Image (cartoon, helix red, strand yellow):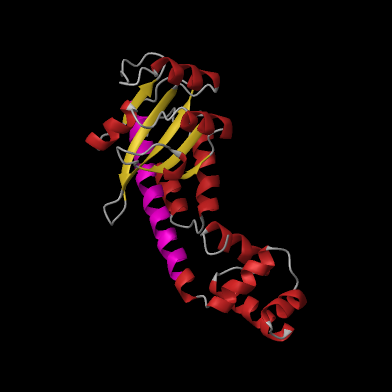
Amino acid sequence: MTSSSPAASVDVYVSEIAKLHTQFDIFRFLKKVTEAYRARAFMVFNLPHSTASDLQSNTVITNWPVELLSAYDSERLVSNSPVMRRLRASTTPFFNDVSTAKLERPDGKSSIVSALFERFRMMRCAYFPTHEPSGARGAVSFSGDREAFTTEEMRELHYIAIHVYDRLAEIRTIDSRMTDTLTDREIDCLNWTAAGKTSVEIADILGLSEHTVNHYLNRATKKLDTVNRAQAVAKALRIGLIK
């Protein structure tokens, strides 16, 4: 690591990643890394299939401006993206400057891409290909309007990206196991709690006693490794257990 690097040590970051337990933890961590490296935004995404028409459905976590992501997808820019094409063809990290890149698009939308990313001051972006133990491929990106990352910074961010993507896969696996352990009644009670119903109201809806509803909710809270009902509902929503 060079003396100009913002991080005290990449090893410190990697040690921190191992202690993160939720996607929100990862979000906060990547926001910190993004700021440390003087970028403006990050994105962790699964590599879209060549026939994909939008980026949002393949995004795991990001702090891209909502307006930018919506505009990107409304123009269907992922379909002919030379960046995505390069990510599918190589596992080598690379830096792309939208304002100077000569990457042609068969749909003729290069000027739209340039204008969109310049508007949000995210013309310069580094991409770090990653993959899960299962083989599923993805990438982590850092965008902004700073100068190009140095070779040393690219190495550091690549190392961080690999660990972040791997940790996210572990978190998803853990969350999936939690989903499998909850009973239908526990999920029902969480759903109605998320809808704003009290234990008494849920008992009336489901034809149960208030004591039984509280029992189901307490068990769901413990299984989801949360400390109260509000956290249990939030986590159940995040992992797609309830909607």
Tell me which residue sits at (43%, 42%) in the image.
Answer: 44
181 w.r.t. 32: above or below = below
240 w.r.t. 33: above or below = below
Which residue is nearer to you in this view: 6 or 230?
230
In the rendered view of the protein, which quadrant contains the N terminus?
Answer: top left
Magenta stretch? 151-177
Which residue is nearer to you in this view: 184 or 25?
184
Q: Is residue 200 left or right of residue 23?
A: right
Q: Locate residue 80, reporting x and y percent.
A: 33, 28
Q: Locate residue 8, reporting x and y percent.
A: 47, 39
In the rendered view of the protein, which quadrant contains the C terminus?
Answer: bottom right
Prevalent SS, magenta region: helix
Q: Hey, which quadrant is residue 95 in on the image?
A: top left
Tell me which residue sits at (43%, 70%) in the image.
Answer: 177
Tell me which residue sits at (44%, 59%) in the image.
Answer: 171
Which residue is nearer to you in this view: 5 or 71?
71
82 w.r.t. 206: above or below = above
56 w.r.t. 200: above or below = above
Q: Locate residue 173, reporting x and y percent.
A: 40, 63
Q: Locate residue 62, reporting x and y percent.
A: 50, 40
Magenta highlight on residue 153: yes
Can residue 239 be seen? yes
Tell me which residue sits at (69%, 80%) in the image.
Answer: 214
Seen as rendered, the residue at the extreme left is 89
Q: Is residue 221 left or right of residue 78?
A: right
Which residue is nearer to you in this view: 21 or 105?
105
